Image (cartoon, grey):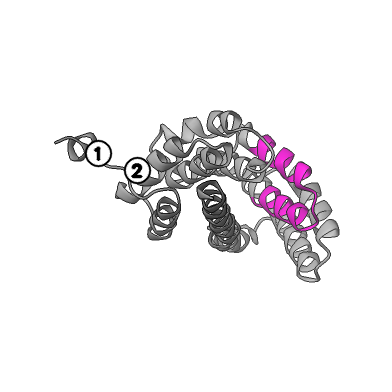
Amino acid sequence: MADIFHDIEEGLRQDRLKKLWRKFRWPLIGLILLIIGAVVALVLVKDVTETRKLEQAERFSNALEIYSTGDSKAAAEAFSSLAFEAEDPGYLVFSSFRSAQAHIESDNINKAISIFDDLAGNAEVLPLYRELAVFFAADLLLDTVTYEEINQRLAPIMLSESVWRPMAQEIVALAALKSGNEDRARELFQELTLDALSPPGIKERAKKFLANIGGIMQSPEEGGD
């Protein structure tokens, strides 16, 4: 009988974790895209005096219009075409991110991952955006690859002072949790709750996950008598 109650409790706990997982997937995507959109607007204003760049600006604007109609496949193609032909690294970056977003919305996840991987490996792209591409690719792969692969992809960001480090650590913690390594997940989530650089939203999510996997770990000093 005790085993039955244990199985029920474990099932309920896993159900809570799955609900949290679904609720907090891609937590900052919307905000990041808004930031990218604001940067794009600045670039468009700056570029209007140059004929070639004006042409690229118009193509980007046309792609946005296609996207606004809900035709994600056509928008992805338009953004991809501009990214491939763009002479300005800025348009390469912005069009690539938008293309990947459109591919995601049309359920072409593999193509989106390929775009992110290409960005991450492009030396002409600023490190800030290369690291963001690495993060997005890892997030998309979270449900299909091992913890080791996620950790390998994101380790350089986690070991750096990157602005994306807390986000990367959250994904690695989720990968550890998915693999059944609750001790590693608990360790990473606890670090996020204590990290002064972690955004409030990530800290709050880390606390919720900790509450579902046994609470905050004690430090060695707190654990001893």
* Vertical order, 110 against 104 (above or below): above
Report x, y in % for residue 32.
55, 57
Residue drawn where x is 80% and y is 49% of the image = 108
Q: Residue furthest bottom?
A: 69
* Vertical order, 22 against 126 (above or below): below
Q: Nearer the viewer, mark 1 or mark 2?
A: 1
Q: Residue furthest front?
A: 1
Magenta stretch, residue numbers: 94-119
Q: Toward which corner of the image does residue 202 lie, by quadrant? A: bottom left
- In-front residue for pair 141/126: 141
In the image, is residue 100 part of the stretch drawn in magenta? yes
Q: What residue is shown with label 2?
A: 191
- In-front residue for pair 126/202: 202
Q: What residue is shown with label 1?
A: 219
Q: Looking at the picture, which amino acid does disc 1 mark?
A: Ser
Q: Which mark is residue 204?
A: none
- In-front residue for pair 47/22: 22
